[in-house]
Image: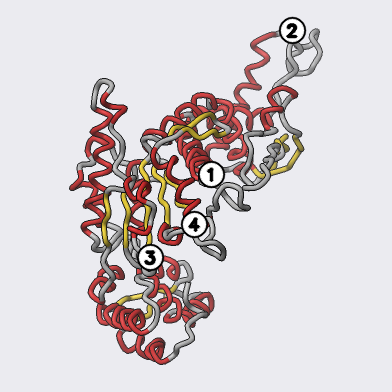
């Protein structure tokens, strides 16, 4: 599910306002990605050969963990419904070593794009698929008479023709009405359902990358996969039949073409931990192949063609957003060629106590609201006091200073420990009726006030 908006309406200011709904602070980073996204729309409006010459200005986000680097990129992609993948640079190895090669990020992007476009196509044909599924359900509930034989199967007895089909049609319409009203939901029907699977991936030697071979293509030549009969209730049968009918209505060739084009023109690849591959190659040890990975990454970022099972994909206009803490290394430790392909660098600021207060209270998806939504399902209502939020933020900020600075992720540590007992007891205490719990500063101090004196927090750090 995406929060997709019309591209023309997404001015840089509007993009920043949307990001502000979920991410606190980091104005510089938001402005940089907003301009980069708007430039993609501007490029689409350019007419003539110059359009192909305009390439995206890739971005490096520099900042400690937990300050919002990944979330900014992810929300940006959801805003425009763009294919988005997040990869970790440290997982890649130089060609010739065992591990993933950099081409796999483009293949992953295409797979995400395929799913996006297929979901949109399925939504477009959903109404027709539901109608077809309903007709198939009615056929199962009231099988039609044998063709050419009427209702009894005897042509001499059923010589009345259409008049004798009228009761069958009337019964079918009554069943349709009951079906739509949900009065038949408890009944079971027997379906022939295709078994999942049918595809196989082969792996190339050396880098464990899947080759472009899919046994599902053989089913087109030798028939569909095996089917088995199952007895299911009406609601499940309706869902299964709707999915099957929508699959029939979707033109997968068009889906693949559209998906490849969308990956090429609006795809976003977020490369995290790029600082882990910075630094010059040494003769041996864990740093071997770091510079090799950078050199393998260079042609992908510069613009090349990657072969996928859905066809060749050009990366010339894919937007690359890299991120790293750069505690040990610095951006200048990357090879010069790769530095040049990330012309925009933005430093994200560490989170202070005031930022943590805003993170807990302002965003629509704040942790406080998430825990409220979780526990209300058990009949337990959480009432967060402002003083409690301030106390949690104070303890989190102090813990980040004394221990490792993990940014906003420290809030997850604290809230999980704060509500540990309540989460465990919620099913029992909420069973008798709605139970309200006031989360005050005293409540916070009693349960997590000693967290600063407890150096071993490994149980709670996520």
What is the distance, in whole Å, between disc 3 and disc 2 at their CAs? 89 Å
Residue identifier under label 1: 104
Whether the residues at callouts 1 and 3 have beta carbons within 8 Å, the answer is no
Q: Nearer the viewer, mark 4 or mark 1?
A: 4
Q: Badge 3: few (under 14), some or many (20 or more) residues near its Cα, within 10 Å?
A: some
What is the distance, in whole Å, between disc 4 and disc 2 at their CAs? 83 Å
- Whichever of labels 4 and 1 marks the residue nearer the N terminus, that label is 1
Whether the residues at callouts 4 and 2 have beta carbons within 8 Å, the answer is no
Q: Secondary structure at mark 1?
A: helix
- Whether residue 319 sits left or right of residue 202 in the image: it is left
Residue identifier under label 3: 329
Q: Secondary structure at mark 2?
A: loop
- Whether residue 112 sits left or right of residue 445 in the image: it is right
Q: Badge 2: few (under 14), some or many (20 or more) residues near its Cα, within 10 Å?
A: few
Place residue 23 in its image quadrant. bottom left
The answer to whether one can see residue 125 in this image is: yes
- Whichever of labels 4 and 3 marks the residue nearer the N terminus, that label is 4
Q: Nearer the viewer, mark 1 or mark 3?
A: 3
User: For the point 38% across and 88% down, which residue is it?
Assistant: 452
Residue identifier under label 2: 159
The answer to whether one can see residue 174 in this image is: no
Q: In the displayed image of the protein, which residue is found farthest to the left?
A: 13
Residue identifier under label 4: 290
Q: Is residue 215 above or below residue 444?
A: above
């Amino acid at each position: 599910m995406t929060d997709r908006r019309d591209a023309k309406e997404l001015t840089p200011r509007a993009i920043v306002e949307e990001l502000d709904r979920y991410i606190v602070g980091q104005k510089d980073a938001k402005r940089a990605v907003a301009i980069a996204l708007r430039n993609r729309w501007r490029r689409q409006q350019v007419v003539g050969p110059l359009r192909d010459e305009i390439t995206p200005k890739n971005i490096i986000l520099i900042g400690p963990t937990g300050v919002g680097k990944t979330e900014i990129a992810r929300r940006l992609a959801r805003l425009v419904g763009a294919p988005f993948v997040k990869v970790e640079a440290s997982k890649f190895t130089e060609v010739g070593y065992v591990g993933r090669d950099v081409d796999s990020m483009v293949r992953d992007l295409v797979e995400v794009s395929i799913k996006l476009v297929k979901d949109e196509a399925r939504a477009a044909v959903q109404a027709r698929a539901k109608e077809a599924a309903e007709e198939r359900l009615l056929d199962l509930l009231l099988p039609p008479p044998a063709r050419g034989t009427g209702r009894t199967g005897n042509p001499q007895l059923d010589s009345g023709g259409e008049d004798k089909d009228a009761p069958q049609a009337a019964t079918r319409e009554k069943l349709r009405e009951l079906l739509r009203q949900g009065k038949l939901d408890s009944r079971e029907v027997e379906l022939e359902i295709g078994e999942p699977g049918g595809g196989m991936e082969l792996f190339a030697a050396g880098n464990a990358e899947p080759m472009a071979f899919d046994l599902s293509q053989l089913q087109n030549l030798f028939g569909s996969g095996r089917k088995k009969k199952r007895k299911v209730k009406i609601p499940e049968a309706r869902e299964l039949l709707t999915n099957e009918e929508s699959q029939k209505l979707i033109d997968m060739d068009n889906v693949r073409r559209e998906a490849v084009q969308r990956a090429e023109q609006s795809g976003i690849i977020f490369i995290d931990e790029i600082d882990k591959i910075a630094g010059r190659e040494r003769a041996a040890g864990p740093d071997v192949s770091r510079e090799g990975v950078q050199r393998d990454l260079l042609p992908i970022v510069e613009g090349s063609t990657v072969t996928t099972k859905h066809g060749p994909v050009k990366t010339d206009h894919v937007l690359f957003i890299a991120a790293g803490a750069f505690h040990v290394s610095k951006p200048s430790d990357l090879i010069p060629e790769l530095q040049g392909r990330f012309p925009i660098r933005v430093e994200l600021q560490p989170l202070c106590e005031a930022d943590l207060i805003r993170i807990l209270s302002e965003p629509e998806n704040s942790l406080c609201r998430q825990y409220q939504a979780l526990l209300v399902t058990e009949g337990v209502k959480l009432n967060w006091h402002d003083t409690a939020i301030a106390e949690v933020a104070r303890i989190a900020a102090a813990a980040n200073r004394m221990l490792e600075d993990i940014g906003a992720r420290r809030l997850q540590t604290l809230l999980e420990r704060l509500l540990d007992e309540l989460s465990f007891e919620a099913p029992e205490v909420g069973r008798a009726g709605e139970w309200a719990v006031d989360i005050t500063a005293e409540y916070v101090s009693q349960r997590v006030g000693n967290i600063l004196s407890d150096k071993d927090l490994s149980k709670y750090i996520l």
